């Protein structure tokens, strides 16, 4: 028994050492080559030794069977990559390791990696993009999470660069309060890094990103060029304007080139769910809506199900955390029932997600109904999809199909998959996916299917917004393995 105990500890120490050796390689590739590394979707940039080891352990859920992914599999791949002078790329080390085991065809690991990444090998000098300026108009729940993600992804500065936030001045110590809200979050925890404020120049510096804080009550009054901002992508997080006429006010401001709305757009605005219809974005689109958190959560799953089984019709019921537009205690509210205390009640209300889904997936027009229940939790929601299918199937087939979609399809950044009888809502705080299919909850009888999809309605949605922004700015690197 003592020998086995020592063996277990020794193996753990060896894995720790390799994970520790991975950290500078991951950082070097990111800052010098704009290469983003991950393990089955779990990012490795700025992660601890334990976080890297946990990402490897998590991979067993994606690989299936009794397979275990080890740092002994991924470290050698990372080492070869660090010697290749790569151009911009997104590389999943877990998938690369599995592909090497199954498709190497006699090649050495080094040759396999060089073959897989040949299209970006030696292309570091081609990373000539100078970065796209970003302005956040509004700095509430979504605005602050977007700021965190953008700062995290700044890298060498040749992607999206957060340059400014625009807010109404709330107090004399407004700047320090804004910085404090960015630094500390009751749901998502502390900001991962350092934050410094400059009261004289109204700036916040977060992990080296200098962010100008601009005070304005009217979007038409801001000249962004006086802050050195040009051809910027502005993200309107206020929800105050949701049509082309209102949002066009931003385009009239010097320094702003395009606008993204973090709410469902009205009129003829394109509602984009990344992974589904982001290919519809053209250079002529000056204003884009990133739809809603619920629309982003359900549309990828609905598309996946329709592609294989066909959807006749269905109903979407969302169990949604309360939001800032509700009241803490009973008070007047223009919306039905929303005036009642959010922390004390389940509140039946409406959702436009079922209708909005048809804007991203036209085949759903007239096929879905929807409703929502606001519940006393501050974050993470659930969509219950009750669907009638064109084909008969069973629970096992549906679950395995969605597991494969989460691993290998073009929707792997949108759809995640969990198979556990013990998960609850807080387990999904910080999920970067649009939605997470709860396989243990799936119900299926012939052509009648009920799916339960968790989603972090704040962070997961913000990640989808950033993906739309990256597409608009043309800074989405190629993903490997292909």
Image: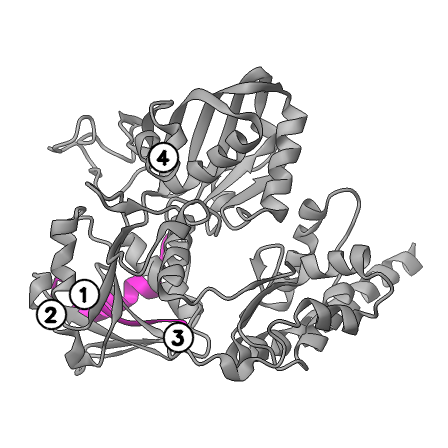
- The image shows residue 292 at horizontal and vertical percentages of 32, 43
Q: Quadrant of residue 444?
A: top right
Mark 3 falls on what kind of element?
Answer: loop
Mark 1, residue position: 166
Mark 4, residue position: 357
| Alpha-carbon span between mark 1 and mark 3 | 21 Å
Mark 1 falls on what kind of element?
Answer: strand
Q: Are marks 1 and 2 in contact (CB under 8 Å)?
A: yes
Q: Are marks 1 and 4 in contact (CB under 8 Å)?
A: no
Mark 2, residue position: 222
Disc 4 crowd rating (10 Å Cα; few below 14, some 14-19, many 20+) is many
Q: Residue at x 12, y 32 (%)?
A: 334
Disc sitting over residue 27 in the figure = none
| Alpha-carbon span between mark 2 and mark 3 | 28 Å
The range drawn in magenta is: 159-186
Question: Closer to us: mark 3 or mark 4?
Answer: 4
Counting labels gives 4
Instruction: Give the mark nearest the N terminus, 1 or 2.
Output: 1
For the residue pair 55 and 375, the one nearer the viewer reads as 55
Question: Closer to us: mark 1 or mark 4?
Answer: 4
Instruction: Give the mark nearest the N terminus, 4 or 2.
Output: 2
Mark 2 falls on what kind of element?
Answer: loop
For the residue pair 441 and 252, the one nearer the viewer reads as 252
Disc sitting over residue 194 in the figure = 3
């Amino acid at each position: 028994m003592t020998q086995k105990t020592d063996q277990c500890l020794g193996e753990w120490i060896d894995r720790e050492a390799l994970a520790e050796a991975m950290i500078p390689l991951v950082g070097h590739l990111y800052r010098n080559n704009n290469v983003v590394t991950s393990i089955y979707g779990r990012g490795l940039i700025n992660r601890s030794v334990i976080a890297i080891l946990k990402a490897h352990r998590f991979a067993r859920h994606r690989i299936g069977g009794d397979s275990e992914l080890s740092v002994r599999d991924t470290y050698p791949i990372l080492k070869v990559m660090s010697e290749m002078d790569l151009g911009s790329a997104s590389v999943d080390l877990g998938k690369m390791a599995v592909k090497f085991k199954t498709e190497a065809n006699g090649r050495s690991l080094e040759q396999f990696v060089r073959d897989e990444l040949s299209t970006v090998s030696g292309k570091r000098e081609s990373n000539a993009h100078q970065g796209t300026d970003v302005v956040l108009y509004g700095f509430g729940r979504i605005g602050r999470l977007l700021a965190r993600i953008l700062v995290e992804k700044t890298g060498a500065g040749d992607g999206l660069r957060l340059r400014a936030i625009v807010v109404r001045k709330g107090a004399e110590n407004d700047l320090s309060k804004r910085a404090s809200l960015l630094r500390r979050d009751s749901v998502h925890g502390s900001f991962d890094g350092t934050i410094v404020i400059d009261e004289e120049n109204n700036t916040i510096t977060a992990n080296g990103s200098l962010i100008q804080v601009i005070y304005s009550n009217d979007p038409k009054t801001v000249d962004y060029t006086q802050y050195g901002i040009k051809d910027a992508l502005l993200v309107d997080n206020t929800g105050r304007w949701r049509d082309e006429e209102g949002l066009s006010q931003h385009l009239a401001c010097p320094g702003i080139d395009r606008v993204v709305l973090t709410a469902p757009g009205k009129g003829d605005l394109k509602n984009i769910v990344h992974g589904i219809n982001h290919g519809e974005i053209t250079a002529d689109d000056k204003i884009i809506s990133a739809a809603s958190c619920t629309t982003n959560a359900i549309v990828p799953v609905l598309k996946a199900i329709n592609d294989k089984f066909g959807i006749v019709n269905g109903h979407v019921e969302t169990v949604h955390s309360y939001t800032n537009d509700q009241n803490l205690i009973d008070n007047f509210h223009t919306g039905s029932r929303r005036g009642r205390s959010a922390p004390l009640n389940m509140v039946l209300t409406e959702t436009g997600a079922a209708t909005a889904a048809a804007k991203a997936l036209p085949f759903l027009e007239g096929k879905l109904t929807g409703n929502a229940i606001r519940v006393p939790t501050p974050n993470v929601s659930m969509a219950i999809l009750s669907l009638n299918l064109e084909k008969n199937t069973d629970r096992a087939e549906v679950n395995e199909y969605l597991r494969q979609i989460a691993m290998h399809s073009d929707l792997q950044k949108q759809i995640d998959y969990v198979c556990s009888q013990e998960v609850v809502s807080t387990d999904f705080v910080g999920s970067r996916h649009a939605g997470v299919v709860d396989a243990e909850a799936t119900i299926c009888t012939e052509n009648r299917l009920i799916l339960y999809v968790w989603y972090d309605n704040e962070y997961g949605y913000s990640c989808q917004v950033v993906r739309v922004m990256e597409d608009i700015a043309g800074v989405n690197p190629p993903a490997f393995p292909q």
